[in-house]
Amino acid sequence: MKTAAYVGNRTIEVREAERPEPGPGQARVRVSHVGLCGTDLHVFHGDMDARVTIPAILGHEMSGTIDALGPGVTGHAPGDAVTVLPLAWDGTCPACRAGNEHICQHLDFIGVDTPGALQEFWIVDASTLVAIPAGVPGRDAALVEPVAVAVHDVRRGEVAPGDAVVVIGGGPIGSLIATVARHAGARVAVAEIDAGRREAVARLGFETIDPGGGPGDDPGSGPAAWVDRWTGGAGADVVFEVSGSEAGVLTATALAKVRGTVVVVAIHPRPRPVDLHRVFWRELRILGARVYQRTDFETAIGLVADGTVPVDDLVSAVVPIEELGGAFGRLERGEAMKILVSVGEGGVGESPDEGVGR
């Protein structure tokens, strides 16, 4: 079988390996599609060499079918369409004992800390399997994991019908948060500095904000002034910080209404300045939102299956596993929104080669 491994120095190698056998409590999944995300790109850049075990088989956004089951596995059958909830927790730490297993203090993020889905046949614990309804294409099902991220974020922010929601960052996760928030009944605007991504977000039907403002330094043209006009002077009910930038953090607190909520979604690699006077003055609530729970996966599957998620607009390309290195290059150059890797037989061509341009 084919596998694709990061071997360091911004290098991916496609290798042949023996087909593995599932042990007790395990399943062997024939992988169909794998999505590439920002975390995978960080690994490719070498930023996580101290964490991953090289050679590292990446991939945690995936779809596939069960190929074989190990002893003791019930509730599943070969041929079932599935995705994988890529979290393994110890069940013993204080977070787990408090019911927060998804943010276990010793969490194993499968596809980063342990081998992931960029292999034709993948051995996983059967407890991580999540069923996909019949008729959902493998290309679409591979988006369930990032949609589950968005579902968790929106749920964490307690978005309600009629809320004014601003998403800072118009990449794949920002676009999905906007989609899920709109589905929850909110009116949504997306702030994105890149003009190409703003155009892509606008095609999805969202209001867009240019964080750079208008010509010159007109104080009436910035994001805070735009949101002030949009909300009749109130400010946004919920602001999602998805950009990962210092400016994004300061903008988030500037846009929230009195007793509004700021949800920090992006992974910030270093401490950021925060306008604590604004937090105090408006009694803002700042929340973190990390990964997801099984209920978020189940909700995400429904949103993908019923067409709420605009898969055709989000998936820029589907490429064979042999072109994985080039796919990372396209992502780092900002030439694609979401790229999927076709790992199993078929799949290439389920999406146009060019969809969302950035």
Image (cartoon, helix red, strand yellow):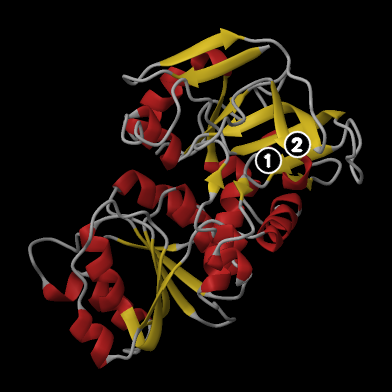
**Residue holding disc 1:** 140
Q: Quadrant of residue 72?
A: top right
Q: In which quarter of the image is the N terminus?
A: top right
Position of residue 69 measured from the top left corner of the image (x, y, whole percent) = 86, 31
The residue at which mark 2 appears reads as: 137
In this picture, residue 135 sits left or right of residue 233: right
Mark 1 in CB contact with mark 2 (< 8 angstroms): yes
Are there few (<14), some (14-19), or many (20+) residues within 10 Å of tag 2? some
* Pointer 1 local density, CA inside 10 Å: few below 14, some 14–19, many at least 20: many
Which residue is found at the position 63% from the left and 53% from the top?
309
For this rendering, which residue is in front, 218 or 183?
183
Q: Where is residue 154 in the image (x, y as percent from the top left)?
A: 54, 68
Query: On the picture, is 77 further left or further right than 5?
Result: right
Up the image or down, 204 lies above or below 117; here it is below
Q: Can residue 335 be seen in this view?
A: no
Q: Which residue lies furthest to the front in this view?
A: 92
Rounded to the nearest angstrom, the CA distance separating label 1 from label 2 is 5 Å
